[in-house]
Image (cartoon, grey):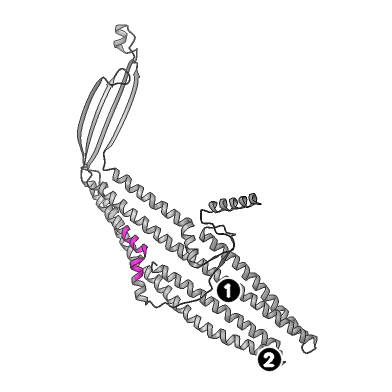
Amino acid sequence: MVKKKLIAWAVLLITALGAGGMAVAAGTALNLEKSIELALKNNRAVKIAETEQEAAAGRLRELRAEKLPVINLTHSGSRLKPNPSEPAFQLLGVDPPVTDYFENKLTASLPLYTGGQLEGYIQQAELGVKNAGLNVTRIKQQVKLDATVAYYNLLQAKSLVKLSEETVERLAAHLKNVQARFNAELITKNDVLRSEVELADAEQSLIKARNGYDLALANLNYVMGIPLGTEIAVEENLSHGQWNQTLNASIEQALQKRPEVAQYDINYEVAKRGVAVAQGGYLPTVSLVGAVDRNDADFPGNDNGNWSVSLVASWDLYNSGRTKSRIDQAKASQDKARQASLQAREAIGLEVRQAYLNVNEAEQRIHASELALDKANEDYQLVRARYRAGLGTNLDVIDTQLALTLAKTNHINALYDYNISLAKLQKAMGM
């Protein structure tokens, strides 16, 4: 028995490690906060953005290293036999000697001045690191929204399944009443058939609702980065609070906190540095180069030696207008980045406004659907009581049942739309 338990625990441990260290046991109850936490931990998009950030940091280190000395050691060995058909060897009547040559060369170089181009590339790389960090933040905000939407999709699907089950139960109970009245010869067979059809339709709706729940569950598992078939339970129910922030304040917060705004500003600064880099093509470059050279006819070649220190300057006095063309391209990229930055601000303002209006609309629909639900429920209870007393018709009961189901569906959808719209508004505001 103990051995079997140890094996079972080992299997669970291996499964957990295989799921990335954030495995979720079947039947685990999750709230929205935990779902978002799992998504941010496991989601592939976040991991990809983080690796891109590491690559940007590596690029910056590479460019900074360009300002430091480069030391290079080379060794070469060669053997040369002259052509025996050359006139000098033929005249002397001797076979040309074989010559060995070995050389060791140590070279060091240091860039002293690059016309500001290397500095410009480094500044661009520094901005690239900031941009990559902001991209991680942007991806996390999107994943948070995806997890929130998937979670509320599951809550909505759960509510619709419950509603469909209640509808089936009410229609099944009503069918029993109809069958009893038919057996007592108080109604015709048509009423029984109509009730049976309504019950069959409700059962089909229940099948669709359960499939919708399974699809919503698989989608939430995907966003959270856990096995798609994991059975989990959601702890919460659809509800709503109240959003009191004004539209203008929401837009202002979005422009301050959305990472995309800062990213477009960085892209403009990168393009601006690109102009300076291109203008550096008009300036000279200066490098300090030192070398130590030792060579000999015998390996390893250390007998003869010399050294040199050189100051190397290079200046393109004329390159057929290539530098000017690069400057024109860089300026065009700068103008494009500026327009893109302005466009992003306008798009974010529109996104916030749309989400804000959708929140207000959903909130009003919630209040309206609550009133309609109360009236539909009261109407159903009255009509059902009248039917049991023999005062109403089967059609009246079915109609009020359909109206009650519709009212509950509208209320569920209004709650869902409110929560989704609020999540989109918060994401649009950079929260």
Instruction: Give neighbour class at mark 2: few <14, some 14-19, many 20+ (Cα, 10 Å).
Output: some
Left or right of residue 7, residue 316 in this image: left
Q: Which residues are magenta?
A: 253-266
In this view, 139 is above or below 248: above
Q: Is residue 263 magenta?
A: yes
Q: Judge by depth and name the residue closer to the eye, 415 or 12.
A: 12
Q: Quadrant of residue 217?
A: bottom right
Taking depth in this image into account, of 419 and 34 the one nearest to the observer is 34
Kindly tell me whether residue 243 is visible in this rendering: yes
Residue pictured at 64% horizontal, 83% vertical: 401
Against 96, residue 238 (above or below) is: below
Q: In the image, residue 53 lies at what x, y percent?
A: 38, 53
Residue 234's tag is none
- Tell whether label 1 touches label 2 (CB within 8 Å): no
Tell me where residue 231 sits by quadrant.
bottom right
* Position in image of residue 88 (x %, y %): 29, 11
In the rendered view, does 259 fall on the left or right side of 152? Answer: left
Residue type pointed to by label 2: Arg
Q: Between 344 and 130, which is closer to the camera in this rendering?
A: 130
Q: Main secondary structure of the magenta part?
A: helix
Residue 237 highlighted magenta (yes or no): no
Q: Is residue 72 above or below residue 215?
A: above
Q: Residue at x 65, y 72 (%)?
A: 206
Count of picture labels: 2
Which residue lies under the disc numbered 2?
386
Quadrant location of the C terminus in the rendered image: bottom left
Instruction: Specify which label sits upstream in the sequence, 2 or 1.
Output: 1
- Residue at mark 1: 159
